[in-house]
Amino acid sequence: MEVSRIIAEIDAQISKLQQARALLAGAAAVGGRRPGRPKGTTAAAKTSVSRKRAKRVLSPDARKRIADAQKRRWAAHRKESDK
């Protein structure tokens, strides 16, 4: 191969790469958005984590209804497994 032909092919590849880079750089500049979490949200996330959520409390009547329902489910399961 001739040296001038090799240099011409290299120049062609360089121009293709420069065009691709220009397209990618232009797309990034037009969009203006980057993937991931936006800047400045980490501080807001830390403050929300530091606050404690109020503990939910069940009434004694609700606890009894839940316990009775679970006992009925266990009894039904035992009855089916005995068959």
Image: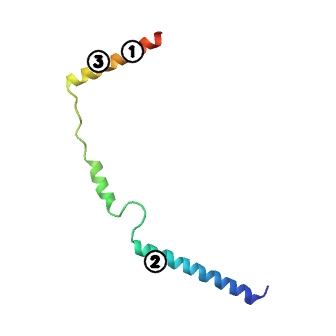
Q: Amino acid at mark 2?
A: Gly
Q: Are marks 3 and 2 in contact (CB under 8 Å)?
A: no
Q: Position of residue 25 (x, y in %)?
A: 48, 76
Q: CA distance from mark 1 to mark 3?
A: 12 Å
| Location of residue 19 (image quadrant) | bottom right
- Disc 1 is placed on an element classified as helix
What is the count of numbered marks?
A: 3
- 4 relative position to 18: left or right: right
Residue topped by disc 2: 26
Residue ID at (33%, 58%): 42
Residue ID at (41%, 75%): 30
Q: Nearer the viewer, mark 1 or mark 2?
A: 1
The colour scheme used to paint the residues is rainbow
Q: Amino acid at mark 3?
A: Asp
Residue ID at (59%, 78%): 17
- Disc 3 is placed on an element classified as helix
Reply above or below: 75 against 35. above
Reply above or below: 39 against 71. below
Question: Around disc 2, counting alpha carbons within 10 Å, would you say few (fewer than 14), some (14 to 19), or many (20 or more)?
Answer: few
Residue topped by disc 3: 68
Which mark is on residue 9?
A: none
The quarter of the image holding the N terminus is bottom right
Residue topped by disc 1: 76
Q: CA distance from mark 3 to mark 2?
A: 66 Å
Q: CA distance from mark 1 to mark 2?
A: 67 Å
Question: Around disc 3, counting alpha carbons within 10 Å, would you say few (fewer than 14), some (14 to 19), or many (20 or more)?
Answer: few
